Amino acid sequence: MESILNNLNNFLSDLNVFYRKLQNYHWNIKGKDFFVVHPKLEEYYTEVNTQIDEIAEHILALCGQPLGTLKDYLNITKITEAENKKVDSTLVYNELIKDYSTLLEDVKNIKNVADKEGEHKTSAMMDDIIDDYSLKIWMLKQSLE
């Protein structure tokens, strides 16, 4: 169980940094497609915020302790923070593809460990997230075509 909990906390850390990155991009997006990208980023960070709560509560349900400080998150995250500057959609889409791919790796790893340990609820939870992130990555790539 310890391996599942560690992997869930790593995922939680990546989600928290990604959440802040999405908000930063939401505030700083510019360009002709502003009216499309601005609300889409809000949609994404709202979804991620919900996932943060679900993952933290799942960690608690497994009798673990979710990480809860920015210091903890920044020490272990694989997601890079966004800079405080104006950005265009091409940069944002490329960063989101990279970050959703990182998160997808997290989730697949959690699923594999959960399957090995017979933790079916965790495994099933990851199935939905895998589907969601895979679709988002595909859509973001299509936006760059």
Image (tube, helix red, strand yellow):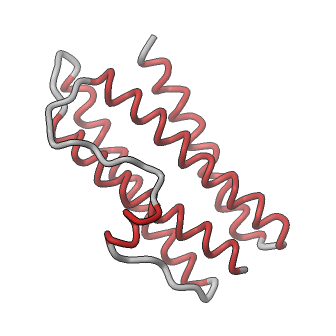
Q: Return the residue found at the far top.
A: 145
The residue lying at 65 percent from left, 62 percent from top is 125
Residue at the image point whose x is 63% and y is 43% from the top: 131
Quarter of the figure that contains the N terminus: bottom right
Residue at image position (64%, 83%) is: 62
- What x and y, as percent, mark residue 74? 37, 63
In which quadrant of the rendered view does residue 3 lie?
bottom right
The percent position of residue 13, horizontal first and vertical second, equals 45, 64
Q: How far across and how far down the image is residue 59, in percent?
A: 56, 78
Quarter in which the C terminus is drawn: top left
Quadrant of res 36: top left
Choose between 5 and 136: the one closer to the eye: 5
Q: Is residue 8 above or below residue 141?
A: below
Would you say 110 lies left or right of 139 here? right
The number of callouts visible is 0
Q: Give the residue furthest to the front.
A: 75
**x and y percentages locating residue 7 in the rendered image:** 62, 66
Relative to 12, 107 lies left or right: right
Whether residue 99 sits left or right of residue 69 in the image: it is right
Eyeballing the image, is 132 above or below 135? below
Q: Residue at x 41, y 55 (%)?
A: 48
**For the view shown, which residue lies furthest in the bottom direction?**
63
